[in-house]
Image (spheres, rainbow, N blue to C red):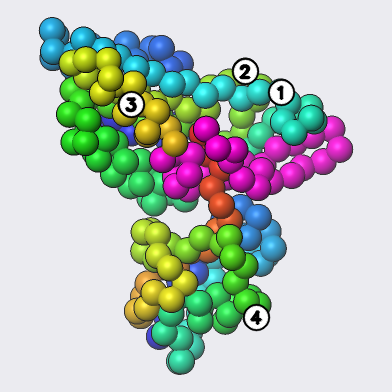
Amino acid sequence: MTVEIHEHPFDPWQIMSAYRSKNLVAGKSGASAVFVGTMRDFNEGDEVQEMALEHYPGMTEQQLKDMRDRAISRHDLEGALVVHRVGVVHPGEDIVLVAAFSAHRKAALDACREMMEILKSTAPFWKKETLAQGERWVERNTPG
Amino acid sequence: MTINVRFFASLRERIGHATMTVEADGITTARDVWKAVSGESPDEEMLVAINKEYAGLDRAVADGDEVAFFPPVTGG
């Protein structure tokens, strides 16, 4: 699977490693670019205890697949990987993994950054934080 | 005309339902669906999907469509 939604904690490095050995043709990819987003224990000056991540089953996966397919064709990638967490997440757990593989570094780095920004602005996910003083929805993502 | 309506995140809490079914004549666009379920004008930031694809509020809806309303996305 190249687009995955996980309900439980995942190990991005294990997924990267498995993807590289299974999906990439040895000798073709000279560059691997990866972004891993991890939950902080603070946001907007407040301590965050946990976070509930919600998605739109069906639409979210399709958005991510389309994004990945477009990145592969636009940047002539050898491969790409998108993994996102849903459910209750705790500080220190990983939320997102985006990786791009290409012959040379520019395509992989550009595609990784571009996919991350598209994911942040269009993929249907929503975060609700639990603070000491109660819960609150994250209203918008900050620009990258 | 039957429309299956879904709400996510803070909009789901505001409406008080995750899903609703709207059966009404005189509904032609997603904006009409929103008015039928909320009685309010849509707020500018609200996002709309028809059959799991992003759509504008003035996009036409058809019998059996799934129309979803949600706030700005905050993944990643």
Locate residue B3, reporting x and y percent: 44, 76
Q: Which residue is mark 4?
A: B39
Question: Tag 1, which secondary structure?
Answer: loop
Q: Is residue B34 left or right of residue B14?
A: left
The answer to whether marks 1 and 2 mark residues whose Cβ atoms lie closer than 8 Å is yes
Using the rendered image of the protein, determine whether residue A49 is visible from the camera's viewpoint: no
- Please tell me whether mark 3 or mark 4 is closer to you in this view: 3
Most extreme residue toward the bottom is B25
Nearer the observer, A94 or A30: A30
Question: Tag 3, which secondary structure?
Answer: helix
The answer to whether marks 1 and 4 mark residues whose Cβ atoms lie closer than 8 Å is no
Q: Which residue is mark 3?
A: A110
Q: Residue at x 43, y 21 (%)?
A: A35
Q: Residue at x 43, y 76 (%)?
A: B58
Locate residue B47, reporting x and y percent: 51, 60
Q: Which residues are magenta?
A: A118-144
Q: Report if residue A143 lies within the magenta region.
A: yes
Q: Which residue is mark 1?
A: A41
Q: Which residue is mark 2?
A: A92
In this picture, is A86 found above or below A37?
Answer: below
- Please tell me whether mark 2 or mark 3 is closer to you in this view: 3
Question: Tag 4, which secondary structure?
Answer: loop
The answer to whether marks 3 and 4 mark residues whose Cβ atoms lie closer than 8 Å is no
Amino acid type indicated by mark 3: Asp
